[in-house]
Image (cartoon, helix red, strand yellow):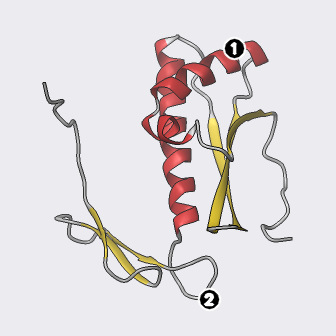
Amino acid sequence: MTEKSLYHTYVHNQDGLVGLSYVVGQEGLSLGVSSSLVPAPGANPEQFIGFALSTCFNATLRIVQRRLKMPINSEVRTRVDEFKDTQGYKFTVEAQILMPDYSEADAKKVVNIALDECPTAKLLKDNEGVTFRLVDNFGEEPVLGE
Protein backbone atom coordinates (compact mmCIF):
# COMPACT_ATOMS: atom_id res chain seq x y z
CA MET A 1 0.00 0.00 0.00
CA THR A 2 1.34 3.42 -0.96
CA GLU A 3 0.80 6.31 1.41
CA LYS A 4 -1.07 9.27 -0.03
CA SER A 5 0.83 12.53 0.37
CA LEU A 6 -1.08 15.18 2.32
CA TYR A 7 1.00 17.92 0.69
CA HIS A 8 3.92 18.13 -1.65
CA THR A 9 6.04 20.91 -3.03
CA TYR A 10 9.02 21.33 -5.28
CA VAL A 11 11.59 23.98 -4.50
CA HIS A 12 13.90 24.57 -7.43
CA ASN A 13 17.41 26.00 -7.48
CA GLN A 14 19.46 26.20 -10.64
CA ASP A 15 22.02 28.84 -9.60
CA GLY A 16 23.72 27.24 -6.59
CA LEU A 17 24.46 29.54 -3.68
CA VAL A 18 24.06 32.90 -5.41
CA GLY A 19 20.82 33.43 -7.31
CA LEU A 20 17.22 32.40 -6.79
CA SER A 21 15.33 29.45 -5.41
CA TYR A 22 11.63 29.23 -6.12
CA VAL A 23 8.58 27.10 -5.49
CA VAL A 24 7.53 25.42 -8.72
CA GLY A 25 4.01 26.36 -9.79
CA GLN A 26 3.57 29.12 -7.21
CA GLU A 27 4.25 32.38 -9.00
CA GLY A 28 5.89 35.01 -6.85
CA LEU A 29 7.22 32.62 -4.23
CA SER A 30 10.94 32.93 -4.80
CA LEU A 31 13.84 33.91 -2.62
CA GLY A 32 17.21 35.34 -3.35
CA VAL A 33 19.79 32.91 -2.01
CA SER A 34 23.45 33.18 -1.16
CA SER A 35 26.13 31.59 0.94
CA SER A 36 26.89 32.72 4.46
CA LEU A 37 30.53 32.66 3.36
CA VAL A 38 30.28 35.26 0.58
CA PRO A 39 29.09 38.89 0.68
CA ALA A 40 25.99 38.55 -1.49
CA PRO A 41 22.34 39.36 -0.73
CA GLY A 42 19.90 36.55 -0.08
CA ALA A 43 18.93 33.94 2.48
CA ASN A 44 21.30 31.07 3.11
CA PRO A 45 20.82 27.37 3.91
CA GLU A 46 21.55 27.94 7.61
CA GLN A 47 18.67 30.41 7.78
CA PHE A 48 16.35 28.03 5.91
CA ILE A 49 17.07 25.29 8.46
CA GLY A 50 16.43 27.74 11.30
CA PHE A 51 13.16 28.92 9.75
CA ALA A 52 11.94 25.39 9.12
CA LEU A 53 12.73 24.05 12.58
CA SER A 54 11.58 27.11 14.56
CA THR A 55 8.29 27.33 12.67
CA CYS A 56 7.38 23.65 12.52
CA PHE A 57 8.48 22.78 16.07
CA ASN A 58 6.73 25.74 17.68
CA ALA A 59 3.54 24.98 15.75
CA THR A 60 3.73 21.38 16.98
CA LEU A 61 4.37 22.47 20.58
CA ARG A 62 1.22 24.58 20.42
CA ILE A 63 -0.82 21.71 18.96
CA VAL A 64 0.33 19.49 21.84
CA GLN A 65 -0.39 22.23 24.40
CA ARG A 66 -3.92 22.68 23.02
CA ARG A 67 -4.57 18.93 22.96
CA LEU A 68 -3.40 18.60 26.60
CA LYS A 69 -5.49 21.66 27.60
CA MET A 70 -2.37 23.46 28.80
CA PRO A 71 -1.47 27.14 28.35
CA ILE A 72 -0.65 27.95 24.72
CA ASN A 73 2.61 29.82 25.05
CA SER A 74 5.83 28.65 23.54
CA GLU A 75 8.56 30.21 21.47
CA VAL A 76 11.39 28.51 19.61
CA ARG A 77 14.65 30.17 18.65
CA THR A 78 16.96 28.06 16.53
CA ARG A 79 20.68 28.69 16.36
CA VAL A 80 22.53 27.27 13.38
CA ASP A 81 26.32 27.35 13.18
CA GLU A 82 28.52 26.26 10.30
CA PHE A 83 31.95 24.72 10.81
CA LYS A 84 34.66 23.42 8.55
CA ASP A 85 35.22 19.70 8.99
CA THR A 86 37.38 17.06 7.35
CA GLN A 87 34.97 16.60 4.43
CA GLY A 88 33.78 20.12 3.70
CA TYR A 89 31.40 21.82 6.11
CA LYS A 90 28.93 20.83 8.80
CA PHE A 91 26.09 22.51 10.65
CA THR A 92 25.21 22.38 14.32
CA VAL A 93 21.63 23.17 15.27
CA GLU A 94 20.27 24.10 18.67
CA ALA A 95 16.55 24.67 19.13
CA GLN A 96 16.01 26.75 22.26
CA ILE A 97 12.50 26.33 23.65
CA LEU A 98 10.88 28.92 25.90
CA MET A 99 7.73 27.92 27.81
CA PRO A 100 7.48 30.51 30.61
CA ASP A 101 4.25 29.33 32.27
CA TYR A 102 5.36 25.72 32.65
CA SER A 103 7.10 23.71 35.32
CA GLU A 104 10.18 21.92 34.04
CA ALA A 105 8.38 18.57 34.20
CA ASP A 106 5.37 19.82 32.20
CA ALA A 107 7.60 21.55 29.65
CA LYS A 108 9.65 18.38 29.15
CA LYS A 109 6.45 16.37 28.68
CA VAL A 110 5.20 18.71 25.94
CA VAL A 111 8.63 18.87 24.26
CA ASN A 112 9.01 15.08 24.23
CA ILE A 113 5.62 14.62 22.62
CA ALA A 114 6.38 17.34 20.05
CA LEU A 115 9.74 15.72 19.22
CA ASP A 116 7.84 12.60 18.17
CA GLU A 117 5.19 14.50 16.18
CA CYS A 118 6.94 17.40 14.43
CA PRO A 119 8.07 16.30 10.94
CA THR A 120 11.05 18.67 10.91
CA ALA A 121 12.18 17.62 14.40
CA LYS A 122 11.83 13.95 13.44
CA LEU A 123 14.03 14.59 10.41
CA LEU A 124 16.76 16.31 12.44
CA LYS A 125 16.66 15.16 16.08
CA ASP A 126 18.79 12.02 15.80
CA ASN A 127 21.62 13.73 13.95
CA GLU A 128 24.92 14.52 15.63
CA GLY A 129 25.10 18.22 16.42
CA VAL A 130 21.33 18.75 16.76
CA THR A 131 19.97 19.59 20.21
CA PHE A 132 16.69 20.73 21.71
CA ARG A 133 17.03 22.70 24.94
CA LEU A 134 14.52 24.26 27.33
CA VAL A 135 15.55 27.79 28.35
CA ASP A 136 14.28 30.32 30.89
CA ASN A 137 14.92 33.20 28.46
CA PHE A 138 16.64 33.75 25.17
CA GLY A 139 18.85 36.52 26.54
CA GLU A 140 21.51 38.27 24.57
CA GLU A 141 23.91 36.05 22.69
CA PRO A 142 27.17 36.99 21.01
CA VAL A 143 27.10 37.57 17.28
CA LEU A 144 27.94 34.34 15.46
CA GLY A 145 31.62 34.13 14.63
CA GLU A 146 32.83 36.06 17.68
- Disc 1 is placed on an element classified as helix
Residue at 72 percent across and 22 percent down: it is 101
Quarter of the rendering occupied by the N terminus: top left
Looking at the rendered image, the quarter that the C terminus falls into is bottom right
Residue in front for this viewpoint, 82 or 67: 82
Where does label 2 land, which residue? 39
Residue 28 in the figure: left or right of residue 95: left
What is the number of callouts on the image?
A: 2
Name the residue that disc number 1 marks: 106
Residue farthest toward the front in the current orientation of the protein: 86
Residue at horizontal 56 percent and vertical 63 percent from the top: 47
Q: In this view of the protein, which residue sits in the foreground, 123 or 61? A: 123
Q: Quadrant of residue 10?
A: bottom left
Callout 2 crowding tier (Cα within 10 Å): few <14, some 14–19, many ≥20: few
Q: Are marks 1 and 2 in contact (CB under 8 Å)?
A: no
- Residue 30 position, x and y percent, is 33, 72
Q: Residue 55: percent from the left, percent from the top?
A: 50, 45
Badge 2 marks a residue whose secondary structure is: loop
Judge from the rendering whether residue 14 lies leftward or rightward of residue 26; answer left or right. right
Which amino acid type is shown beneath numbered disc 1? Asp
Which residue is rendered at x = 47% and y = 32% of the image?
118
Between 67 and 110, the one nearer to me in the picture: 110
Q: Nearer the viewer, mark 1 or mark 2?
A: 2
| Amino acid type indicated by mark 2 | Pro
